[in-house]
Amino acid sequence: MVMKITLGGVSKPHSSKNMKTGDWGTEYPVVDEEKCTACKACEYLCPDACIVVVEKDDKKVAVPDYEYCKGCGVCFSVCPADAIRMELKEIYKLEVC
Amino acid sequence: MVSILIEVRFHGRGGQGVVTAADILAVAGFKDGYYTLSFPTFGAEKRGTPVASFLRLSDKPIVSRDEIYYPDYVVVMDPTVIGPVKVEAGLKAEGRLIANYPKGSEDLKREMGWDFEVYTINATKMAMEHLGRPITNTAMVGAFVGATNVIKLESLLETIEEWFTNKELAEKNLKLVKEAYEYMRKVCGW
Amino acid sequence: MRKVVRGFYSIAYSVKLCRPNVIAAYPITPQTEIVENLASMYANGELGECEYVTAESEFGAASILVGASAAGARTFTATCSQGLILMSEVLINAAGMRLPIVLVNTNRALSAPLSIWNDHQDSMILRDAGLMQIHVESNQEAHDMVPVAFKVAENHKVMLPFMINMDGYKLTHAYEPIDLLDQETIDEFLPSYDPPVYMTTKNPLTFGSYAPPQYYAEFRVVMQNAMDRARKELENAYKEWAEITGRDWGGHVVAENVEDAELVAIAMGSLTGMVRDVVSELRTQGKKVGLLKIRTLRPFPIEEVRKALKNAEKILVFERAVSFGHEGPVGMEVKSACFGLTPEFYSFAVGLGGRDIPREEIVKIIGNVYEGKVEQGFHFGTVKPFEEVIV
Ligand code: SF4
Ligand code: SF4
């Protein structure tokens, strides 16, 4: 298949959604919904806009999008409520055979 | 006069110290009297992106700065890049691939259909034990030296010691490097 | 002292030894770590009588240096790409004001499309700006050329800004052994800056005043004359450097195996080493090929280039930029130097926007030109098949 060169390097919105970056990281963020105060610090500062505060069971909480989360840990660093921890992905936990 | 040129390619993901691994070996190789050159692929500098880095060792000043297409050795720091990235591309027939992989080398060879020399080590587990974090670069440089003999262990240890200004961290990494080195020597039957 | 260091550091360290008075910069990849290193040296009190200013933009950085230089300070900055062209309005002024600002440009492509990777499009855009410009092949050469730049820029016979071009990433991010200079060597080579004219709060001056048509042309003649004198002064500085340090990088150009060469390949910057390597390999196979490395781009070493190419049947230029609507910029320069000679001429734009230039590509291009398999004129290097579409 030949490369398509768009006039002006123009691209349509959301085309970066095809680039699923969720498998890039070694760790992923886990939100403790009890502790989360829905302050949105993580939402504002995630470099990939992939953790957002949503309505969930009558409560507002931050939810990471693991399809795109790169595991950078920014949300973990900025959360004022200590509501985020970074977990090692399963693949890295395997034992030697 | 035949000159020596050893070319190594490292694969992993941003944030795992893929660049540092090549750099550490560039310093260790320099201590051994080689001319050395290490450099990264220049992608987006974000944690988690698949990245590569390159190392050349030679007895003559190194003038070629192109990426390494026909490596003598490939070092894979992260098991998840095997497959998505063609890590074995261009590996010389007599070359070796050294991988951080939770299973044995025969499993990896079978899975990938590889017929060249492959050595595996569970560097993530080792790194977790020693450092408490899955940063595999120091383990993998130890494994590389153990599996190839191109650099002296003493030069590597000296480099590691200088690399970490934090004494405690240096100690932990020295232990990790030695363990990975010993493990590889055993695996390679040396 | 020989040490394995990153390209950034080799520059920053050399700048420090040159005892700058004012450094102003704005970060841009792949330059940032040069000024980051300088900023931390400044913070650690290692820069002596120096002010480090983090500007709000490259335009600001260059403007700060114009002021500082006019006040008699030794000034330095580093930038590239969009940063360089944002500076350009100020740098062109600095040249006219005859201010010896030294900058390192870590060559990077220009937008659009956005690219943070290496080629020479950025510095080529400033070809006519009145800056002296050189290209370096290695981090050692970059490290060595910083004091040379200050010396020639601040030479009273010259008094022009000086831009050292080094390939972004290929050099800046490379980690390799460098013979780091010592303070004594630099102090012996580079006297402190003695500005021929400078302003103070008590003695205010206007730099680059208004010049209506009755006067303007003469100022431009004077600038051209300064560039002409810079040719000699720069060559002298190269020589003196070689004597003091024992590291001889050659003059404005380095010609190798050109005397009997049928084909002379021309390269600038970090690609040169590999081209040299390929050329010497072809020599051992009995092929009559030579290399011309162009170090100085401005003032353009027209005599040296012509001399090196006088016997060549074929000239092959490796371009790292394009003058759209014409051809590669280095080829244009080389052709003008060869006026009246009648070699065949070929040029290839390679490694645009940071595309890696594998050795095989260089071997193939030289081989094809040598064997007469390509048409004369300007070509692009490896390009994938594509189709143009509207999104
Ligand atoms: S780890 Fe990084 S990418 Fe993932 S949600 Fe948190 S801030 Fe976003
Ligand atoms: S920063 Fe912490 S507390 Fe605030 S929304 Fe995110 S997870 Fe909740």
Image (cartoon, coloured by chain):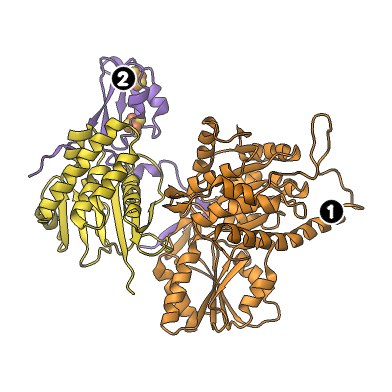
Chain colours: A purple, B yellow, C orange
**Which amino acid does the dot numbered 1 rest on?**
Phe
Q: Residues within 10 Å of mark 2 (few under 14, many from 20)?
A: many
In the rendered image, residue C134, in percent from the top left (x then y), is placed at 61, 58
Do the residues marked 1 and 2 share a common chain?
Answer: no
Find disc 1 in the rendering and name its residue.
C219
Disc 1 C-beta below 8 A from ligand 1 = no
Image vertical order of residue C226 relative to residue C80, above or below? below
Name the mark on residue A61: 2
Residue at 49 percent across and 58 percent down: it is: C138
Q: State the separation of the CA atoms marked 1 and 2.
A: 68 Å
Q: Residues within 10 Å of mark 1 (few under 14, many from 20)?
A: some
Disc 2 C-beta below 8 A from ligand 2 = yes
**Which amino acid does the dot numbered 2 rest on?**
Val
Q: Picture quarter containing residue B180?
A: top left
In the rendered image, residue C372, in percent from the top left (x then y), is placed at 50, 84
Q: Chain of mark 2?
A: A
Q: Quadrant of ligand 1?
A: top left
Q: Picture quarter containing residue A31?
A: top left
Frontmost residue, C141 versus C262: C141
Name the mark on residue C16: none
Tell which residue pokes out farthest to the left in this image.
A97
